[in-house]
Image (cartoon, rainbow, N blue to C red):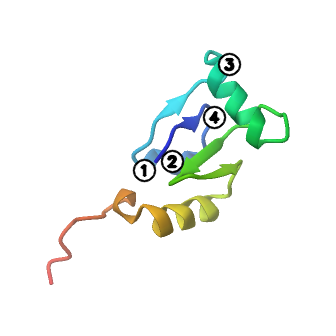
Amino acid sequence: MSPVYEGAAAPLTRLRHSEVNIWKDPDAAAFVRSVADGNETVPTVTVAGETMVNPSRSRLFEAVREHAPHLMPGAGRSTGT
């Protein structure tokens, strides 16, 4: 999963992620503006090359399940069956 730009939604705390403060990182701010119609909208999240501006919780988890299921909470744990 690519950087999560500062201000990310609470669901991300359950996923492995990295945060970037776009107000301290000019390159990150430029990236966010490039995908958010010139705005510095947070959160802006990239999962496996798919960038989402202020995604809903369900959209975010849908993208992770689709592109990076190994990052989902509990992934790789034995089910005991």
The residue wearing badge 4 is: 7
Q: Are marks 2 and 1 in contact (CB under 8 Å)?
A: yes
Which residue position holds label 1? 15
Q: Above or below — where is 23 with respect to 58?
A: above
Amino acid type for the residue under numbered disc 4: Gly
Q: Residue at x 36, y 59 (%)?
A: 73
Q: Residue at x 58, y 58 (%)?
A: 60
- Please state if 17 lies on the left or on the right of 50 as rendered: left
Counting from the top left corner in percent of width and height, residue 5 is at: 60, 34
Mark 1, other Cα within 10 Å: few <14 / some 14–19 / many ≥20:
some
- Mark 4 and mark 2: Cα distance apart in space: 10 Å
Query: What amino acid does circle 3 point to?
Result: Trp
Which sits earlier in the primary sequence, circle 3 or circle 1? 1
Using a 10 Å C-alpha cutoff, classify the residue at mark 2 as few (fewer than 14 neighbours), some (14 to 19) or many (20 or more): some
Q: Amino acid at mark 2?
A: Leu
User: What separation in Å lies between label 1 and label 4 (alpha carbons)?
Assistant: 15 Å
* Mark 4 or mark 2: whose residue is earlier in sequence: 4
Q: Return the residue at label 3.
A: 23
Q: Earlier in the sequence, mark 3 or mark 2?
A: 2
Q: Which residue is mark 2?
A: 12
Of 22 and 8, the residue lying toward us: 22
Disc 3 and disc 2: Cα gap in Å?
20 Å
Residue beneath the point at 20% across and 76% down: 79
Q: For the residues marked 3 and 4, what is the alpha-carbon distance in whole angstroms?
A: 11 Å
